[in-house]
Amino acid sequence: QVQLVESGGGLVQAGGSLRLSCAASGRTFSSAAMGWFRQAPGKEREFVAIINWSGGITRYADSVKGRFTISRDNAANTVYLQMNSLKPEDTAVYYCAAFTSSPYSSGTYYRERDYDYWGQGTQVTVSS
């Protein structure tokens, strides 16, 4: 069982930065791939970024590549999403998710259904 709690969302002006955190409970965190997804009003939830268990493999959606950075601290059971050069179109509820089905996997997972556990989400609003 893994519980995920996101924090760090808020209101920021375009061009600004935010750092999201996702604190995990449970022993499986350090062996799990972790992802960030987001859902804007009226839209489906979409993939943002993924990091494998060791932090050695990361992937990003094209829309955030070069602006967002995903990282993790396994000792602290936390995954982060550093968001720079924010745009109004980044406005959404951001969710972290854990892929625990294949421990220590080096695969990359972009689909919601691949993930076993989800946080409650944190709102990010970027004003123009």
Image (tube, rainbow, N blue to C red):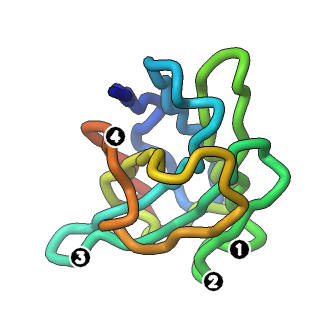
| Residue 63, x across and y down, in percent | 58, 80
Q: Residue at x 34, y 67 (%)?
A: 112
Q: Nearer the viewer, mark 4 or mark 3?
A: 3
Exactly how many numbered labels are in the figure?
4
Q: CA distance from mark 2 to mark 1?
A: 5 Å
Residue type, numbered disc 1? Lys
| Residue 18, x across and y down, in percent | 59, 42
Q: Residue at x 70, y 25 (%)?
A: 74
Instruction: Look at the numbered disc 3 and give the secondary structure of its residue.
Output: loop
Q: CA distance from mark 1 to mark 3?
A: 20 Å
Q: Which mark is residue 85?
A: none
Q: Answer yes or no: do the residues labelled 2 and 4 have beta carbons within 8 Å?
A: no
User: Could you classify mark 1 by the number of other residues whose Cα lies within 10 Å: few (under 14), some (14-19), or many (20 or more)?
Assistant: few
Q: CA distance from mark 3 to mark 2?
A: 17 Å
Residue on which the image places disc 1: 65
Give whichever of discs 3 and 2 has the lower sequence position: 3
Q: Residue at x 61, y 59 (%)?
A: 50
Please give left or right for residue 10 compared with residue 21 in the image: left
Residue at the farthest front position: 102
Q: CA distance from mark 2 to mark 4?
A: 21 Å
Q: Nearer the viewer, residue 63 or 86?
A: 63
Residue on which the image places disc 3: 44
Residue type, numbered disc 2? Asp
Residue type, numbered disc 3? Glu
Q: Which mark is residue 122?
A: 4
User: Could you classify mark 4 by the number of other residues whose Cα lies within 10 Å: few (under 14), some (14-19), or many (20 or more)?
Assistant: many
Give whichever of discs 2 and 4 has the lower sequence position: 2
